[in-house]
């Protein structure tokens, strides 16, 4: 329990979710999704005062995630389990002026953001791609979020090009391509 941060108040809630996730994977559950944060957008959806807010949120997930990865590895489950920590966009590197009902702050930003994947046939310790010096645009090995989706689906043995979800036009517009450079 200490490995997952259950012995610390700030990480106990998410640590419990991570420990339950490991137990579910160990029992053969094929898909587990965890959320951190509350409310419709979650506590990570900060348009302003980001450093202060993320300095509060990051310690809540840091030890539990490290514990989950370490525990999956020592139990021989990490090779067959893909762990994804991500979102669909980042934040602009600078603040925009407010307007109307929108307060000033950092807006949603799909041109430069990060996520990470571990296990499940993904190379460990690899950084793939980078942004410009201020983090505005992806400049090295850029990918759209659907490339990440296609990569995860590929690792699960599914072809994103054959996926049909009625009414989901985004899939029709950009199905994504698996990022083979990050796979083992």
Image (spheres, rainbow, N blue to C red):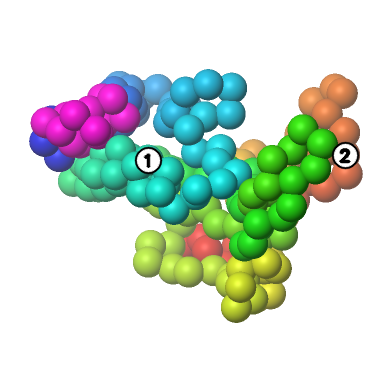
User: In the rendered view, would you say 147 is above or below 36?
Assistant: below
Q: Which residue is mark 2?
A: 172
Image quarter hosting the N terminus: top left
Q: Residues within 10 Å of mark 2 (few under 14, many from 20)?
A: some
Residue sitting at x 52%, y 53%: 115
Q: Decide which of 23, 91 is in the foreground and name it.
A: 91
Residue 125 drawn at (x, y percent) = 37, 66
Residue 67 drawn at (x, y percent) = 22, 42
Q: Residue 102, which numbered label? A: none
Residue 150 drawn at (x, y percent) = 67, 47
Horizontally, residue 95 falls left or right of residue 123, namely: right
Residue 172 drawn at (x, y percent) = 87, 39
Q: Residues within 10 Å of mark 1 (few under 14, many from 20)?
A: some
Q: Residue 6, can we see it?
A: yes
Q: Which residues are drawn in magenta?
A: 4-16
User: In the rendered view, would you say 183 is above or below 171?
Assistant: below
Does 5 appear in magenta? Answer: yes
Q: Which residue is mark 1?
A: 57
Horizontally, residue 25 falls left or right of residue 41, namely: left
Q: Decide which of 163, 17 is in the foreground and name it.
A: 17
Does 131 appear in magenta? Answer: no
């Amino acid at each position: 329990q200490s490995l997952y941060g259950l012995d610390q108040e700030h990480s106990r809630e998410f640590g419990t979710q991570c420990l339950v996730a490991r137990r579910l994977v160990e029992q053969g559950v094929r898909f587990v999704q965890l959320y951190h944060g509350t409310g419709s957008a979650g506590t990570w959806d900060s348009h302003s005062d980001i450093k202060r807010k993320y300095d509060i949120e990051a310690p809540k997930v840091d030890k539990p995630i490290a514990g989950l990865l370490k525990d999956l590895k020592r139990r021989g489950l990490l090779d067959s389990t893909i762990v994804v920590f991500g979102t669909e966009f980042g934040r602009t590197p600078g603040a925009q002026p407010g307007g109307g009902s929108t307060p000033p702050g950092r807006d949603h930003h799909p041109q430069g953001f990060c996520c990470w994947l571990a296990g499940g046939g993904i190379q460990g310790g690899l950084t793939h791609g980078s942004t410009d010096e201020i983090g505005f645009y992806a400049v090295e090995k850029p990918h759209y979020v659907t490339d990440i989706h296609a990569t995860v689906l590929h690792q699960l043995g599914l072809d994103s090009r054959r996926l049909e979800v009625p009414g989901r036009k985004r899939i029709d517009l950009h199905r994504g391509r698996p990022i083979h450079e990050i796979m083992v």
